[in-house]
Amino acid sequence: MSAINRERDEYLSRVTAYYMRGNHTFRALPLDVEGALAALREERDAGETYGMLCGRPNGVVPGPVHASTAAEWPAFEDAARPWLETVVARSKPPNGVFSGGTPSAGKRG
């Protein structure tokens, strides 16, 4: 594996998202908005309506979003979508960083 691929894989593996249930057990969420929302709905359907969205690393992933009751779930899901969109966007390397060479900003002409 090239150094660039290794660096890219390391960057991508750092960003994670979880649903932490009320009993402090975690479910890892896919870095795909619709897939993560489907997983959250599975948690709701299983009765796990008290919990929160969280992730790593701090400073890259937004602060937690809390869920508390089944009645309040629609508001949680409304807040979860932009949170997940941010996490997914930040899980991708910045444009040009891992393109196979020195970023164009570092070139002198």
Image: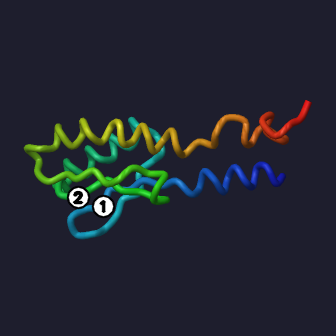
Give the residue displayed 36% in from the left and 59% down from the top: 27
Asked whether, in this view, residue 86 is left or right of residue 39, the answer is right
- The quadrant the C terminus occupies is top right
Q: Earlier in the sequence, mark 2 or mark 1?
A: 1
**In front of the other: 1 or 79:** 79
Near mark 2 (Cα within 10 A), the count class, few <14, some 14-19 or many ≥20, is many
- Would you place residue 59 above or below residue 88 in this image? below
Compare residues 38 and 20 and report the one nearer the observer.
20
| Residue lying farthest to the left in this orientation | 71
In the rendered image, which quarter contains the N terminus?
bottom right
Using residue 44 as the reference point, say whether residue 16 is left or right of it: right
Question: In this rendering, would 45 be left or right of 96?
Answer: left
Specify the label residue 46 is tagged with: none
How far across and down, in percent of the image, does residue 105 sit?
78, 36
Q: Amino acid at mark 1?
A: Met
Q: Circle 2 — which element?
A: strand
The percent position of residue 47, horizontal first and vertical second, equals 16, 55
Tag 2 near tag 1, CB within 8 Å: yes
Residues packed near mark 1 inside 10 Å, few (<14), some (14 to 19) or many (20 plus): many
Q: Position of residue 18 (x, y in %)?
A: 38, 56
How far across and down, in percent of the image, does residue 74 sit?
17, 37
Q: Specify whether 99 is left or right of 80.
A: right
Q: Residue furthest right?
A: 109
What residue is rendered at 80% in x and 34% in y? Answer: 104
Q: Secondary structure at mark 1?
A: strand
Per the rendering, the mark at residue 20 is 1
The amino acid at mark 2 is Gly
Q: Quadrant of residue 87?
A: top left
What number is the disc on residue 51? 2
CA separation in Å, label 2 and label 1: 5 Å
Query: In which quarter of the view is residue 100 placed?
Result: top right
